[in-house]
Amino acid sequence: MTLVSARTQRHDPGQHGRPQGVEPLDRASVPVALTDTEVRRIRNDFPILEKEVNGKPLVYLDSGATSQNPVSVLEAEQEFYEQRNAAVHRGAHQLAVDATDAFEDARATVAGFVGATDSELVWTANATAGLNLLAYSFSNASVGHAGAAAERFMLAPGDEVLVTEMEHHANLIPWQELCRRTGATLKFIPIDDDGALRLEEADRLITGRTKVLAFTHVSNVLGSINPVQELTAMAHRVGALVVLDACQSAPHLPLDLKALDVDFAVFSGHKMLGPTGIGALYGRAGLLDAMPPFLTGGSMITTVSMSEAQYLPAPQRFEAGTQAVSQAVAFAAAVNYLGETGMERIHRWEMELGQRLVVGLQAIDGVRVLGPVAGRDRTGLAAFDVAGVHAHDVGQFLDARGIAVRVGHHCAQPLHRRLGLSASTRASTYLYNTTDEIDQLLDAVSNVRGYFGVDASGERR
Amino acid sequence: MSDLDVLYQQIILDHAKVRTGGDLPESETAAAPVFPGIGQSHQLNPVCGDEITLRVTVEDGKVASVRWNGAGCAISMASASVLSELAEGVVPEELLGLIGNFREVMRSRGKLAGEEEILGDAAAFSGVSRYPARVKCAMLAWVAAEEALRQAVAA
Ligand SMILES: Cc1ncc(COP(=O)(O)O)c(C=O)c1O
């Protein structure tokens, strides 16, 4: 194998970068959704999808939790270890230079994928780590660690952090804790019975006291897409910082963080065909450099004395210690795969799958779908409740047919409580799911109540 | 019998519906009663949200009743129901022994089968031990009973 740098790979995806079976698009034409035929060929790139589970072909409908990896991603990680593994940003030997190039090229690739530049993208372990980084940096700013330059990030009693009622715990608890540390108040934008954000309430809640507005782009339970630009404009009008949880959007739709005008965003590699252990925090140019660090130590400093240290600018300032280098390289291979396939086409395909899910689920007696009803915009996921059957039992029943779904509260307890549930079953799709798989799920779900002897009202017979 | 039917034995599905002892009013569970011979425990499985509040009453040296209030999957609800039936009239020491036996079977990863002469209907849960994710569901009521019983006899 010849040594191809990630940069050349990015411009020419070459032999293993290009997804099988997807015709390169004529840029001038309007992108259309992937087709079932293309998806069936795409599946060949994902070795795990050939697996059998409980004697049945695997039907993987849990990509909202974590996605599967194409061969190009697996190979990128292996190639890094076979050809370029060394410590990055230190050492003067050739391998260290190659490793550093691969690492920084990966950063540029992932940044470009979300409309950012490389200095605006900080590697994190995952989205949760990115949100905690922000919360702890703001809390360090609040006790004066970065001086007056960090005034924008300071919180004190009387200030407010605003989230929504539909947040994943990862975009809730770090803010609860930040408020505890600083004395600021946490508030939330409520949802209506259908799970939609109540924008009139948002308008009322976003005031001069609001310092941070943190919300999810796409709900991991409802599949709804929140109006990012509208909310961001409201927050910016009062000078608040906007933090976007892009965990369920970056993998599934074309994302341009610059166009959305948010100040910060987080996402996780493992939800977008990449490996675990790598994610990213985006921070608008200028903001990251003004923030104090969270984790400190090696690789993030300029001068160190026995009593104090000076820090590198972003992104290095926030990357203390040895980084997840091979994962970053593989993450870049993942977004290359997505980019080659076409995010608009993936998005449209998943919207079709999402509609097929909702329409089918709504037609089953005793099944309640959470979030937007059929015909309304939703991404390719649907969480639902089967009257009288606990989600755990639904999941077990589906697993026996080889169908993998998520059951429980999906790290969104307040949202479930608001909808009168403690748990639900969630089917979530990705670019490799076929309409046939959706139909298998629907068929299985329609047999659940019969198996457990429950009628449509949820009465135990 | 399919693997699924081994897990969800008919006895289990029946108990999940009958829910013996599952009539403890929620309004009564807020504050644990502090009378001699009564113990109460609340258990939560944070993974799936299964929840139970279970009360054990001991009279004349025997378990007089096990009543509970809970929400959860078929396995956890059926297991509470079976336990309520099994426990009535049993000496506390003996019930602790049964709980220990049940726990051993549940943790055996399919290696031990519960004996019907000892565990009665609870032996039907043996299949659960092959599903590590579900063992907690089956154990929930039993862990609650263990704690409540110790309180009841200590009081
Ligand atoms: C909306 C949303 N936010 C945050 C997260 C947390 O992601 P991670 O566990 O990769 O940090 C998830 C994933 O479960 C999610 O769906």
Image: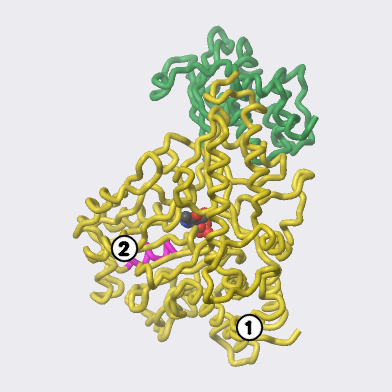
Chain colours: A yellow, B green
Query: Does residue A214 appear left or right of residue A435 in this picture?
Result: left
Using the numbered discs, state the Cα–Cα distance from disc 1 to disc 2 in whole angstroms: 36 Å
Q: Secondary structure at mark 2?
A: helix
Judged from this view, the residue extending furthest toward the front is A29
Magenta-highlighted stretch: main secondary structure?
A: helix
Amino acid at the residue labelled 1: Asp
- Beta carbon of the mark 1 residue lies under 8 A of ligand 1: no
> Residue at the spot x=55%, y=7% of the render?
B60
Q: Is residue A73 visible?
A: no
- Residue A12 or residue A179, whichever sits in front: A12
Q: Is residue A208 visible?
A: yes
Q: Secondary structure at mark 1?
A: loop
In the image, residue A353 lies at what x, y percent? Answer: 58, 52
Q: Considering the image in quadrants, where does the N terminus of chain B appear?
A: top right
Tag 1: Cα neighbours inside 10 Å, few (<14), some, or many (≥20)? Answer: few
> Residue at the spot x=39%, y=73% of the render?
A258
Circles 1 and 2 on the same chain: yes
Mark 1 belongs to which subunit?
A
- Residue A257 or residue B41, whichever sits in front: A257
Is residue A136 one of those drawn in magenta? yes
Q: Which mark is residue B27?
A: none
Q: Earlier in the sequence, mark 1 or mark 2?
A: 1
Q: Which residues are magenta?
A: A130-140
- Residue named by callout 1: A12
Tag 2: Cα neighbours inside 10 Å, few (<14), some, or many (≥20)? Answer: many
Q: Quadrant of residue A325?
A: bottom right
- Residue B101 or residue A34, whichever sits in front: A34
Is residue A392 one of those drawn in magenta? no
A16 up-or-down from A160: above or below: below
Query: Does residue B155 appear left or right of residue A51 in this picture?
Result: left
In the image, residue A436 lies at what x, y percent? Answer: 68, 49
- Residue named by callout 2: A232
